[in-house]
Amino acid sequence: MVEPRSRSTTPTAPLKLLFVSTPVGPLGTGIGGGVELTLQNMAQILTERGYQVHVVAPRGSTLPNATIIQIDGIVQTPAQTQERTAPILMPPDSVLARMWDYTRQVQTNYDLIVNFAYDWLPFYLTPFLRTPVAHMVSMGSLTDAMDQIIAEVAAQAPATIGVYTQTQAATFAFFDQCYPLGSGLDLSLYQFCEEPGPWLCWLGRIAPEKALEDAVAAVQATRTPLKILGQIQDTAYWQQIQQDYPDAPIEYLGFLPTKQMQQVVGQCRALLITSRWVEAFGNVVIEALACGTPVIAYRRGGPAEIVREGKSGWLVEPDSVSGLITAIGSIDEIDRVACRQQAESEYSLSALGDRVEQWFREILCTRL
Ligand code: HBI
């Protein structure tokens, strides 16, 4: 009897990829926020699947098991600190300019370049380059100059504008030309914790757009101890919070690497997300769910797409401290096992890897 032929899917020859990092700071320092984790996780799953991944990044960058080309130069001003009408900023001796000059020189060694910078230059250079560029857009609409240059690339090179969520895409006029990728984590790095301590936690870059003061105001009222983790990006802002809430039950633990961070988050009753701005995604949300820790978040941006109300946490009226206080009182209604299960079904590294491979295929076949 003739054996039925297995449906042969033509295997895509493993691609040679060049990842070009965010220029706001070295990878591994936390200054690059969520996009650092995205770059690291994409590099990990694609390397595991046989792709060659090289990473161009500012000097001082670290990345587990990836080939990094370290580039000198002045880091870029964080885009979220700029006015909407801000002109394009390029410091002299810019690390961004140098990373892309290097990329120009080596481009023919790669099948695809992936840009992780939320900056004007990589988008402007895209049509000058012979190797196709995929753009991982890490934030929602912030400035007119970025909106305009991304729109031009979206029109010239379909499917090359990757975003985290539909909510983030919706902040752009070209929302229907964005390719939603969600995110993903190496869940083996996150231990499920069944019995938390009394603490709540807050995790992220300490900067005005993250509105840490709302979380501090809420725990001041409920007298629930709050552990704070993350990079202090705006020192004056952090000092102001401590002055405004001198006897709030808060403890700052610094920016911890994933292993230590997840241990702390897993022991907490809930993660508080208080962002003032439209978070593109909210990696910290799926990091908490992976530990079994429910999430209390403003109904705004990516977290509002991730948190399942009453299942993996509570969504709160944006900027409402009293809403946070009410949700804190209802945390024990959430099943911590359901939180971990949502991370496993929707945000595993392999789920992200599938979505990214499909994205690359769509870009390259439109190029062929
Ligand atoms: N600002 N200019 C600029 N470029 C980036 O790549 C950038 C940024 N601000 C924040 C940021 N990237 C990352 O923290 C994102 O994950 C938000």
Image: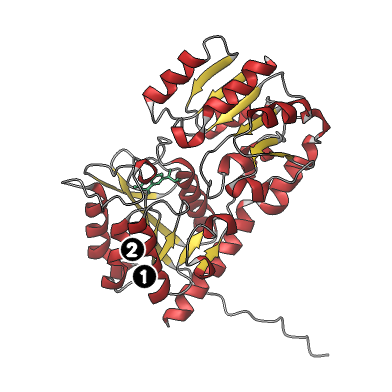
- Residue 111: in sight, yes or no? no
Q: Which mark is residue 152?
A: 1
Residue pictured at 48% horizontal, 53% vertical: 140
Q: 1 or 45, which lies in front?
A: 45
Residue at (59% x, 21% y) in the render: 217
Name which residue lies at 51% across and 43% down.
Answer: 277
Residue 330, quarter of picture: top right
Q: Quadrant of the N terminus?
A: bottom right
- Horizontally, is 317 left or right of 32 in the view? right
Do the residues under discs 2 and 1 have CB atoms within 8 angstroms?
yes
Identify the mark at residue 260; answer none if there is no mark. Answer: none
Please provide percent x and percent y for residue 317: 66, 39
Distance (Cα) linking label 2 and label 1 = 8 Å
- 294, 5: nearer the viewer: 294
Is 268 situated above or below 244?
below
* The image quarter in which residue 341 lies: top right
Residue 265 location (% of width, % of height): 63, 29
Residue identified by numbered label 2 = 123
Of the residues shown, which amino acid type is indicated by label 2?
Phe
Q: Residues within 10 Å of mark 1 (few under 14, many from 20)?
A: some
Q: Residue at x 74, y 41 (%)?
A: 312
Compared across the picture, whether 277 is left or right of 27 comes to right
Outermost residue, top direction? 247
Q: Counting residues from the N terminus, which is met first, the one under dot 2 or under dot 1?
A: 2
Question: Measured from the top left, where is residue 288 in percent x and y?
Answer: 65, 36
